[in-house]
Amino acid sequence: MASILTNTNAMSALSTLRSISSNMEATQNAISTGKSVASASDNAAYWSISTTMKSDNMALGAVSDALGLGAAKVDTAYAGMDAAIDVVTEIKAKLVAAKEQGVDKEKIQEEISQLQDQLTSIAESASFNGQNWLANEGGDVTVITGFVRAADNTVTVKSSTITLDDTNMLFSADAAGVIDEATGILGANGTASSSSIVGFEIDNDTDSDTLDNLLTDVETALTSMVSAGATLGSLSSRIDLQSEFADKLSDAIETGIGRLVDADMNEESTRLKALQTQQQLAIQALSIANSDSQNILSLFR
């Protein structure tokens, strides 16, 4: 039936044109933003997952920064401990030399005194960002090692804790950094000579038994220093591995987010071309449908 009040063909063509225009808008938005899921209205599930993972990835980036800071602290402490081991080894050699009959022990003490001052300098200067693990008040220090999201969506920041005490610090120190030579690995506590490694003195009257006690103290200190250095070295290695893993994990998360929300530009460009053709055809169809009313006029001529 031909009607001048209701043009069903034009209405159908107009509906098709609107649908094509809507699809073109979505495709053009994907091309301009590079994302197939730019908002929750595009795909609520994928948008929710990607938004959460982006947040986690930012937190992981902060963990990577914290790992770098922790690595710097550990490496500074290890460098100081390693240097102190070399100095104490030199002191050990000087004490062995002092056991030789006829040597000038006072001259040897002059060399030892310089080495003792160097030990104090190492302990005081092995500081990073105000934190000194070799001359410290003692207590627990922590290093960030990871960020974890559990299956129940709870998040946890992982860390490793080291307890600083007389077994792994060169000296104890107060809040101002003033060291106490009676404490720490190099202190006088529990030494056979009742003197700290940086406090003893020898002269030509020092007997062999005293030198033996000093050698025992130095050897005990070296053993403790090597153990503390090994702990610092293993922690540094763990931080390096965790930092490398954090970088890889961040890349993997970013890739996963991209697979969820990034647009396939090849596919989108092909779709745009097809929609443009469909739009032209729909406009043509609408034009033909609108001409039906004019055709009715010819019946009354």
Image (cartoon, rainbow, N blue to C red):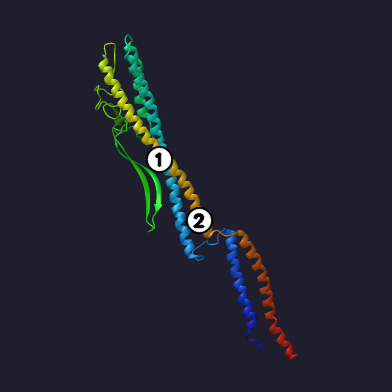
At x 62%, y 75%, the residue is 16
- Near-viewer residue (73 or 8): 73
Q: Position of residue 78 (x, y in %)?
A: 39, 33
At x 26%, y 17%, the residue is 210
Looking at the rendered image, the quarter that the C terminus falls into is: bottom right
**74 vs 282: above or below:** above
Left of 41 or right of it: where is 149?
left
Q: Type of residue at label 2?
A: Gly
> Which label belongs to residue 299?
none
Q: Position of residue 118 (x, y in %)?
A: 37, 23
Q: Residue furthest bottom?
A: 300
At x 48%, y 46%, the residue is 247
> Which label belongs to residue 70?
1
Dot 1 or dot 2: first in sequence order is 1
Left of 12 or right of it: where is 137?
left
Q: Which residue is mark 2?
A: 256
Q: Position of residue 14 (x, y in %)?
A: 62, 77
